[in-house]
Image: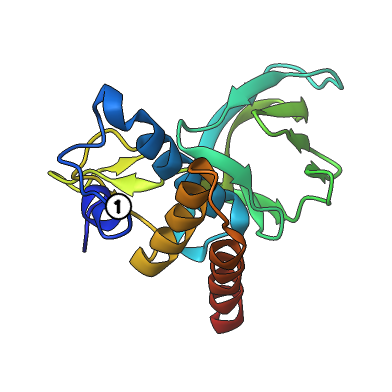
Amino acid sequence: MKNVLEIVNGVISKPVESLFTPDNENILACVKDALASLLRARRWKEMIKSGVCSFHSTENTNKIIQAIHYNDDFFNICKDYNIYISENEKVIESGFMNLEGVYSSDNFEITFYHDVIHINKSPIGNFKLYYMYQTCIVVYDGDDYSEKTEVEKDKDIPVFDEKLFEASFKFFYKKMLNEPYADEYDYYQQQIKNVFNND
């Protein structure tokens, strides 16, 4: 697997020793734009994770009982997956949220916003909520392969397919240089479609 610097140097006219210098800020910005664009392009199966949070209620109420923040790597909620609610390590309820991100039943009402989960209705008790989400992980650390939400060094490795990242970077690089980029954009979009079609 090639790291970001190796991929970038295969595209630009004059290879650089590092992306993290004042002279190469524009190139690094293109790398970040390319990764962000890929992240937004679709829901990547490889980047779906399970999330879990605990909540409790001491009274039956219809006001916000608890506001819970997502994990640091949260990008968006997967609405087409079941959510599960457990009590004492036993699943007591499961089902789907609606298109607005609301799960509602006789016992619970839970709203999944883009930045927080609101527990709006709950019986008395201590519960765990399980859900699926897409991460915003875009690179692996080049030394220990830990997941990262932002490129931080030359040795970082894109989580996306190398050719796909290269196509994305080429488009943003040409755009940054104010050079014609229609062909690069079309090729990048076709690569995205190919991934969709192969799923």
Q: Position of residue 145 (x, y in %)?
A: 20, 48
Residue pictured at 45% horizontal, 48% vertical: 173
Q: Secondary structure at mark 1?
A: helix
Q: Amino acid at mark 1?
A: Val
Picture layout, residue 22 above or below residue 11: above
**Can residue 124 be seen in this snapshot?**
yes
Q: Position of residue 163 (x, y in %)?
A: 38, 68
Q: Which quadrant would the N terminus be assigned to in this image?
A: bottom left
Residue pictured at 41% horizontal, 59% vertical: 165
Question: Outermost residue toward the front?
Answer: 179
Q: How many marks?
A: 1
Q: On the rendered structure, is 13 left or right of 132?
A: left
Residue pictured at 45% horizontal, 63% vertical: 167
**Can residue 149 be seen in this snapshot?**
no
Picture layout, residue 183 above or below residue 180: below
Residue 105 sits in quarter: top right
Q: On the rendered structure, is 123 left or right of 177?
A: right
Of residues 149 and 181, which is closer to you in this image? 181
Residue denoted by label 1: 8
Residue 61 sits in quarter: top right
Residue 87 sits in quarter: top right
Q: Which quadrant would the C terminus be assigned to in this image?
A: bottom right
Q: Position of residue 52 (x, y in %)?
A: 51, 40
Question: Outermost residue toward the bottom?
Answer: 198
Of residues 10 and 189, which is closer to you in this image? 10
Q: Classify 10 Å Cα crowding around label 1: few (below 14), some (14-19), many (20 and above).
A: many
Of residues 129 and 92, which is closer to you in this image? 129
